[in-house]
Image (cartoon, helix red, strand yellow):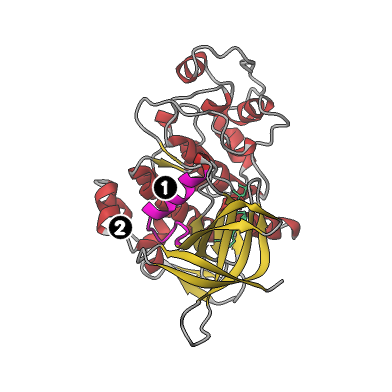
Amino acid sequence: MAIEYLVEEVTNNHTNVTKPMIIKDIAKIGEGAFGTVTQAQLRNATASEDQWLGPFAIKKVPAQTEYKSRELEILRQTSHPNVVSLKYFFNYPNPEDRNKLYQHLVMESLPCTLQTEIKRYHSSNLILHESHIQVYSFQIARAMNYLHSFGICHRDIKPSNILIDPDTLVLKICDFGSAKKLEYNQPSVSYICSRYYRAPELIVGCSLYTTQIDIWGLGCVIAEMFIGKPVFQGQDPMLQLREISKLLGPPDKEFIYESNPSYNGPMYSHRLYTSKVSTRFQKTFSHASPVAVDLLMSVLVYRPQDRLRPPAILAHDFFKPLRSPDFQVISRTTNSRVNVHNMLYNFSDYELRVLGGAAKEILVDGS
Ligand SMILES: Nc1ncnc2c1ncn2[C@@H]1O[C@H](COP(=O)(O)OP(=O)(O)OP(=O)(O)O)[C@@H](O)[C@H]1O
């Protein structure tokens, strides 16, 4: 591929300085519903030395739609080790249609997504080791603790929107194309989020939802790491609720009414199983430890108010082993031991303030 082009106005997200830069597209690394993601390098067009920066990941989406500029706005506001960072941004025409401007978001690049990692294990009839699931889930919850503190709801949590580096086990949430800062009592569209990861309140048409819809997505992602495939695979939007009811039991009328008083779709109120919910969780997640099952049962809960929130998730006993400064995991790629404690626990003062009383439990190594 390696196509080079000059862009007169490229803004550095960190310094806010706009300069001409040369962009070298290397390879396509992703394709989404709205645009493409390519691996690319950048260099200052005015500097004499030929020093390429990167590689980065450049996401190209049609510019000037209100929907997509939210992604830029949110990426500009955020700075967190578990949220993909924006390095530069610019508008540039589409080579196939010179009249159409594309917004280019130049982000740090990570080697793979959690989706490819889960699939790699699943295709060898393996599942991720529980220690890896702990490390990845902790980082997603930490990103949510940060984002939700500003009211930012990602609204499309799924394994393909979670980037990882399997050497270091670093994880970063990406794709803020659906994200929105939710305001108290302000309605938002309920037709967001990919079907398998949609919270039950969205399925029944709730428009006053909260950032707790992301927590449902987190539960689905943790579940998928344990079983190697999406836990709720509905064949259509309504059958999605039926899949959920197979594990959680039928949703009660109060939940439906609280979510959307004018809902008139199927209620799935018949019990599909006689066994207890806890038995079904244990059976579904037969490879998970009891403490992991307990976390899943506290997150995959119908009522959003009853789902654990990020501070309580980070303080959950599932993550207890990570609190030891000696906690190590074996990297799949390098086969060497990696000490991940420091990268997991480098909480900023802001994050600690947000965690409030839970910070003590999260930080204290009781081993
Ligand atoms: N910073 C990055 N580093 C490496 N790969 C990335 C990065 N950002 C995105 N990708 C890859 O590109 C894919 C699509 O990116 P993204 O989800 O942001 O685009 P999208 O158009 O919103 O896609 P979708 O419609 O699937 O949600 C990701 O699943 C991932 O494989």
Of all residues shown, which one is farthest toward the bottom?
Answer: 49
Mark in front: 1 vs 2:
1
Q: Nearer the viewer, residue 108 or 8?
A: 8
User: Residue 304's spot in the image, x, y percent?
Assistant: 44, 30
Ligand 1 image-quadrant field: bottom right
For residue 311, which quarter of the picture? Answer: top left
* Circle 1: residue type: Met
Query: Where is mark 1, residue-wise?
Result: 144
Figure check: 138 above or below 250: below
The amino acid marked with disc number 2 is: Leu
Q: Is residue 86 left or right of residue 242?
A: left
Q: Which residues are magenta?
A: 68-86
- The label on residue 363 is 2
**Frontmost residue, 144 versus 120:** 144
User: Mark 1 or mark 2: which comes first in sequence?
Assistant: 1
Q: Secondary structure at mark 1?
A: helix
Quadrant of the frame with the C terminus: bottom left
Rendered location of residue 364, percent (x, y):
29, 58
